[in-house]
């Protein structure tokens, strides 16, 4: 009888969990991070391990994100079971001895696994013996150029200490951990494409240490690293169920800024609508996510340029841009990526750079941007332009781009 009653109690919650909406976008790269509170640990976190397991699996399956960085994976058997149940995903778990591990799940249809490792071993104390997990993946698929992406999952020291002195030390440990991360990405991962995501255990506007200290991540903000979660925090959202503020974050490599879909960051703080008593029987954190223009990560050649046999480029006036006679050709001189983009993109030059100029026109033939190419890889930022079709002119060649 007890088993029957337990099943009846679980059945409504199970039905509700199946109504979790799809969040992932089939044409974009969706990346999520989530602290799953002592997942699989029978002595900590939610008391019903089976219910927590089914709820976490339902959220991952139903939302259909492409990459998940998870924190507090606290049982190796539960990790193996979840990996076996999520057949569409490959998975990597932490190898350190600390119980609360980090792991990464990624869609096997989108990525090939290259490597996984723990980084910053010399800062083990500052990371509370949870050294960041870095997983290197290679993109795959017919529509994209193979590229290498680095996913770093972090879980910094919490503010759960009993004494004032201990809380101050935890604050300093978070700051030193952020210092170590900054040094690592600016040396080992300089000019790489990476994402740092997870439970940072502190806010970006000020510190949860005592409500008055500056954020321990000020050095990263001062260096203009893009935390895509800032607008969510500014809007009064929370990522931790039992206190105000945002403590789960995703930070991008500078090279990924232009691939980020503007205002696509979100937090699934409505999970209580689909899973009854979510913050007590599943986890006390809400998943965060962002979307990226993965299917246009990089072109190996310019797109939609004007072939000379259709319309000689030297007959095109500089104040007008043809649009109806554009065809696609291969030109090994330049790479332009990503496309579409959000107003920021790169022009990579494969020849001598001192003879080229960049001009950009709207579809009315009006010039909206001009500058010489001074670097092998030139970043162009057009943040003030409206969405639509634009034409990039590099000397006498035109290339079509779309700003979303």
Image: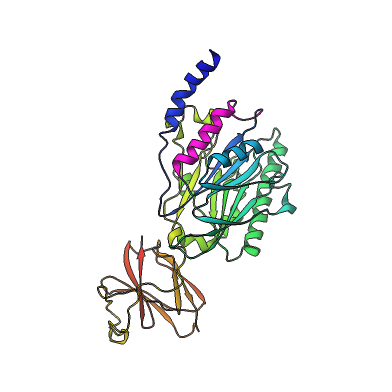
In the rendered view, would you say 175 is above or below 350?
above
Note whether residue 21 is visible. Answer: yes
State the residue at coordinates (54%, 37%).
285
Give the farthest residue toward the top: 1
Asked if one can make out residue 205 in the rendered structure from this viewpoint, the answer is no
Question: Of residues 147 and 162, which is closer to you in this image?
Answer: 147
Q: Which residues are magenta?
A: 43-64
Quarter in which the C terminus is drawn:
bottom left
Residue nearest the observer in this picture, 388 or 61: 61
Residue 150 location (% of width, % of height): 58, 57
Residue 271 x/y as whole percent: 46, 34
Residue at 42%, 55% in the rendered image: 262
Instruction: Judge left or right: residue 334 versus residue 205.
Output: left
Main SS, magenta residues? helix
- Identify the image quadrant of residue 103: top right
**Residue 273 is one of the magenta-drawn residues:** no
Count the labels in the image.
Answer: 0
| Residue 23 drawn at (x, y percent) | 42, 44
Residue visible at 70% across and 43% down in the picture: 128
């Amino acid at each position: 009888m007890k088993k029957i009653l337990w099943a009846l109690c679980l059945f409504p919650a199970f039905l509700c969990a199946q109504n979790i909406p799809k969040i992932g976008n089939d044409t974009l790269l969706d990346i999520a991070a989530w602290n799953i509170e002592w997942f699989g640990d029978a002595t900590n976190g939610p008391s019903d391990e089976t219910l927590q397991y089914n709820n976490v699996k339902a959220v991952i399956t139903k939302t259909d994100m492409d990459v998940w960085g998870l924190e507090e994976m606290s049982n190796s058997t539960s990790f193996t079971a979840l990996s076996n149940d999520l057949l569409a995903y490959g998975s990597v778990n932490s190898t350190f001895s600390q119980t609360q591990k980090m792991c990464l799940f990624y869609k096997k249809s989108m990525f090939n696994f290259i490597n996984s490792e723990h980084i910053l071993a010399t800062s083990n104390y500052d990371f509370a013996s949870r050294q960041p997990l870095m997983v290197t993946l290679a993109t795959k698929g017919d529509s994209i150029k193979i590229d290498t992406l680095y996913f770093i999952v972090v879980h910094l020291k919490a503010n759960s200490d009993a004494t004032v002195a201990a809380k101050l030390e935890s604050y300093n440990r978070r700051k030193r951990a952020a210092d170590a991360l900054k040094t690592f990405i600016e040396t080992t991962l300089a000019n790489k494409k990476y994402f740092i995501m997870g439970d940072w255990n502190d806010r970006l506007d000020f510190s949860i240490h005592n409500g008055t200290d500056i954020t321990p991540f000020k050095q990263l903000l001062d260096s203009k690293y893009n935390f895509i979660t800032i607008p969510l925090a500014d809007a009064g959202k929370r990522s931790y169920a039992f206190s105000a503020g945002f403590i789960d974050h995703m930070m991008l490599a500078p090279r990924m800024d232009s691939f980020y879909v503007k205002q696509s960051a979100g937090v699934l703080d409505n999970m209580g609508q689909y899973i009854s008593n979510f913050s007590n029987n599943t986890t006390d954190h809400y998943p965060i996510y962002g979307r990226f223009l993965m299917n246009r990560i990089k072109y190996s050649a310019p797109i939609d340029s004007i072939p000379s046999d259709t319309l000689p480029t030297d007959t095109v006036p500089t104040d007008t841009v043809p649009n109806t006679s554009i065809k696609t050709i291969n030109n090994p001189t330049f790479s332009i990526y990503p496309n579409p983009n959000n107003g920021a993109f790169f022009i990579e030059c494969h020849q001598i750079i001192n003879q080229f100029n960049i001009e950009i026109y709207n579809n009315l033939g009006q010039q909206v941007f001009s500058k010489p190419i001074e670097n092998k890889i030139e970043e162009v930022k057009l943040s003030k332009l409206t969405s639509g079709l634009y034409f990039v002119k590099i000397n006498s060649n035109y290339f079509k781009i779309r700003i979303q």
